[in-house]
Each structure stands twice: as structure tokens, then as C-alpha cells.
Amino acid sequence: MKSDRISAAQFAADGSFAGRLQKLVRDVVVPYQYGILNDALPDAEKSHAVENMRLAARKMAGEDIPPEAFYGMIFQDSDVAKWIEAAAYTLIATGRDEKLEREIDGIVDLYAAGQHADGYVNSYFTVKAPGREWQDLREAHELYCGGHMMEAAAAYYEATGKRKLLDVMCRFADCAYEEFMHRNTRGYPGHPEVELALMKLFRATGEKRYMELAKHFIDMRGQAPNYFVEEEKNRGWSVWRGSAELDTDYTQSTLPVREQKDAVGHAVRAVYLYTGMADVAKETGDETLLAACRTLWESITRRRMYVTGGIGSTGIGEAFTVDYHLPNDTVYAETCASIGLMFFAKKMLENEHWGEYSDVMERAFYNTALAGMQLDGTKFFYVNPLEVVPGVSGVAVTHLDDLPERPGWYACACCPPNIARCVASLGVYGYSENETTLFADLYLGGTVKTAKGTAIRCETAFPHGGAVRYTFCGAADLTFAVRVPAWSRKTALSVNGEAVELRAVEKDGYAYLTRRWQEGDTVELTLDMTPRFVYADPRVAADSGKVAVRMGALIYCAESVDNGEVLPLRVDTGVPPRSLPLDSALLGGVVPVELSGVREETAQALYTDEPPKRTPCTIRMIPYYAWANRGLSEMRVWLPEA
């Protein structure tokens, strides 16, 4: 059953968890990141991203700008694009803001002034490498940057009705269409992203050529002879990587996409590609492409995904490795990758409404994606480890990526604005609809309006509480499909206070309720929030003999700030986990969980033939998303059994 996203404008959060997150993004994250992008915060990593656009505009106006004036990554424009998108969704979610719009418009003016006569726009190539446009598709990120700005343009147009950025990106898309549909028909981006962005541009404008170009890039990928191999031979130079690093798995281009069986290579590139594939499959009805998406989905979620919804097991290539290789302390699990997994899950939901897609989308958001941002909105994780030992993590040469505390910014700053745009647009992931059915995919406090104008209010304390109440604000003839998550062992459902037998209405993880709804009608869902132990497949060597803890959507972790040293802790799995009352003063309001266990005494020698002494103890755990918010601390998700 195909469905469409709810527009971001159709959902308004209330003061619950989702609303507080969106308020944080509006009040703190968006202004903070604007300051960084404009190099106005001296204590943060230099960005220069807006200044790069200013330099490009000056050069297009005839000034002599030296190439070395450009600063930062080749894809620096994309940081600004994601910030604009986050700011645009903030305008939708929390209301128009003249000051913020002036800031956005100022950046749009700079970006537009750097556009070439043929529609091409990219500050790196305008300032630093003029004349080399479109020659290094594998690593130059021109289409990646353009794609992110297309997404920003579509969001800002939706938020304000202003067309300037949209028109700029339509000209860029037209330029790319001419290049890759006529002059270089075999080329496609090394970093997928523009495929999903072109689909958004298609929906914003109705221009079918943009969908045609997205499909072309997907169809050409991996065709023999490999384009990137041939490109490097013919070019003889690279703006980014040397020829020794050419790896077709890294760019998901070893095989045509319909023949790919395993999720390989750079994890963010992979899920961005798969999102575009799923979107094109939905729009065109391409069943072979959808079948490939299902296969790749299973590769990720059944064999290559962390319990937190993190993906990408190694920092070498920021990549997937092999099945069941999921180390906890050297994991990469980039924040962007989990956000991309949410994108992929949502597009699969739009093709076929299976609860598994929503379950994974929820897991990725409430754990890895949220862990990517400090609770105050001013520091960010790029990498999301499941085990941290200060003095080893971020220090040992094997653990340099796995930091114990969040930095304020990064030289490669793709993740901070990504989490901002994800939170700001959260309503998009919370609901879907088609002509007959409204789907509640996530549990978000607030009010949603269907395309036909029906409004439904959701009240919930989720993810810290399991009661979800929907109230109809007006009459409507429709099917309301409420997700029943796989993690809830005992779920109760009622309509207007009368119990509904789930088995009679549940299909593929959703409870379908069809009736003539009246104003004031209620649907209540009670989810089982009993904390439980989680055990990994025995083939996951890193988790052998260990357990994790989950409560609802949340994965928990132990920090030394609550427990003293964490490494000596062992869990008594004969005693079930116990949830404590909501502590509103702890980490913004969380439900702690306690375990029974033992603490092993530190040995007097590196190795000994004496068994360690064990002392009974209580182990206190917090939600994983909230770790590293109380200073330097040991942390573990997977704890050994006693």
C-alpha cells in the first residue's frame, strides 16, 4: 500500500519531547550554527562556508580572487545548504521569523551571485579549481552539494513561498541535465545524494526532467566498464583522493544497483543512494528497483546494524565491513548514516507500509541520531561509539575517531546541520497518508492535519512513557492506521474507551481502524515499556556473553558518573531490569533503569590465575542518547553477564 509523506507544514508539535527538541533547534541550534558558518564564534572550529560563497560571488563579479582564498572541504557548500534546510523547517514547525528569514535571504543572495551563466554553481570550483568542473565525479561532490541545496530550496519554498533559491537550483538542475543526459551520459555522482534531492525538486516544481535525471543516475551506476575507473584514467588528477584509493565498493558502484546484494562502502553514501532508489521505485512503479531496495534493507538491518540503529562499522572509509562485524569501541556509526537510514526507512514505508520500517526509523532517531547532539544543542558527535574508555577512546591510534566528549564543530561538519534539519522536520517522519488512510508512524505529541483537512491531536510522554492518545478534531471518513511496534510485547488498544482486539485489526505492524470518526473520538494505545535485556546474535563476536538493555524505543547505557568504573561491572540476568520513576531533573527528564549485578575487583597483576573477587552492586543506566552530557565518563551499552 503506497503512501506519501505528510508535509512538514501539516504537523505542529506540542510541549512534549518532540516539541522540546524542535524548540531547542529553533532557539539554540540554528542561531549557534549560523554563527559558526559565518566564523563569528572564535572558540569553534573555523567554517568559512559563507565566506567561500562570498568569494565566489565576488569572483563572478569580476574580482581577482586567489585560489588559496577558499578554505575548508570541497563540499563546504553543503554545510550551508543543510543549515538553510533546518532553518526553513524551523519556520514551518514553529512559525515565521523575520530575522531568520533575513539571514537566510542574505545567504541565498550570495549563493545566487556565484552562479555561472549556464546554471552551474559551486564555490570550490568557482574559486579554487575553475575549468575543472564535472571532471572528478567520484570525489568532487559537485552533485552532492547541489543536491543538498536543492533540498534546502524546496524546504524554503514550502516555508515561505520565496522562489529565488528554488529558481537557482532549477537552473543548476537544468545544467546537470544537459551535462549528463546529453554530453556525458555515463557519469553519475561518487557521493549519492542528488538522486533523492532531484525527486524533491521534481515534487516542488512538477518538472519531470528532474525525476528522469535521478533515475538516469541510478540506472547508470555500476554499469561496465566502471565509470570511475575510466574517469581516473582519462583525467590523470584528482581534487580529493589519489588513484591508489580507488575502490568501487566505497562508492556502491561495483555492480548495477539492481544486482547489489550487500550494503557496502561508505555508509552515508549507501543509504542516500538507497533512499533515492526507493523514491524512484515508488514514483515509477519499478518493481525490480524496489526488490533491490528490500534486499539492501535486509543486508543492513539483519546483519550490519547496531542495536542503537547505528551503521558503518569502521572509520576506514566510514564504511560497512562484513556481516555481524559490529565492534563497540572502534565503531564509526556516523550520525549522518543513521539519519540517512531514517530517510531510507521512510521511503520504504511510502512503498509498502510495514511496521519494521518504522521500528528501524524510530530506533535510529531516538538513539544514534539524537546522541549526535548534546542536550544543550551546542556540541555534536560525528562518530557514535557504544563503548568509551577515557584515555583510550580518542587517544589510541585505533580509537582516534571514537571521542569521549562532543566537540563544538568539525572541519568536516556534515553531521551538526544534518541533525538540525532532521529534528526540525520530524513531523515528516511521524505520519504518512494516502487517499483513504492516515498512518501514525512515530509517536509525536502535537497535531497533524491530513491533506483533506482532518486534524488529529496526539498526547504522549513518549519515548519515556507508553501511553499514546489520539483525539479527532472534527468529523472524518478515513482509516486511521496506528503503528504497533515489535518491541511492545503487551499492547492495548481502545477506541472511545472500548477495548479493541488487536489481532482483528492488525496487519504488518499497524492497527487499521476504519469508521466515520466524530469530533472528540479517541484512539488510545498503551505500549509495554517494561525494560528488557537484549541479546545479540551469537555471530556478533563483540557482544558474546553480554547484554544490552532497552525500554521501549530507547537503548540504555551505563556511565561511570553513576556507577564508578564501568568496565568491572557484570550483570545478573536472573534479575529483570527495573525502571525508576521519571527524573525530571536528570538529563532533561529521563527514566533511569537499574540492574542487579556484581563488581569485579581490579587485579593486582595484568594476568593472574586467581579468579576476581566480586561484590554485589546495583548498576544504574540512562538512555544512550543522553550519554556524555555530564563530563568525561566511561560508557558501555553492552555489559558482560555475571
Image: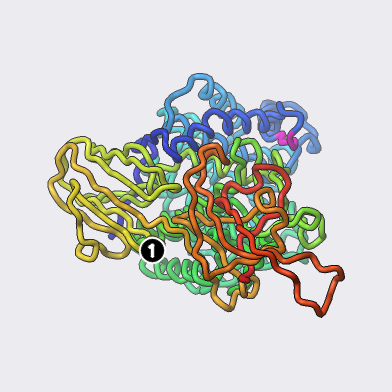
How many marks do you count on the picture? Answer: 1
Query: What are the residue bounds of the magenta stretch?
Result: 44-48
Work out whether residue 557 can be spotted: yes
Disc 1: which residue = 486
Neighbor class of circle 1 (other Cα within 10 Å; few <14, some 14-19, many 20+) is: some
Of 408 and 531, which appears nearest the observer? 531
Horizontal side of residue 409 vs 535, given as left or right? right
In the image, residue 58 above or below residue 633: above
The residue under the point 79% across, 65% down is 602
Residue under the image location 64 percent in, 36 percent down: 378
Up the image or down, 416 lies above or below 255; here it is above
Asked if residue 279 can be seen in this view, the reply is no
Q: Nearer the viewer, residue 449 or 559?
A: 559
Which residue of the protein is positioned furthest toward the right in this rendering?
605
Q: Position of residue 407 (x, y in %)?
A: 71, 42
Secondary structure at numbered mark 1? loop
- Residue furthest left as drawn: 516
Is 613 rendered above or below residue 130? below
Where residue 237 sits in the image (x, y, percent)? 77, 57
Find the residue positioned furthest to the top: 98
The picture places residue 234, in percent across and down from the top left corner, at: 71, 62
Q: Amino acid at mark 1?
A: Ala
Q: Is residue 146 magenta?
A: no
Identity of the residue drawn at 53% across and 50% down: 592
The image quarter containing residue 556 is: bottom right
Estimate the x, y position of residue 533 in percent, counting from the top left: 51, 65
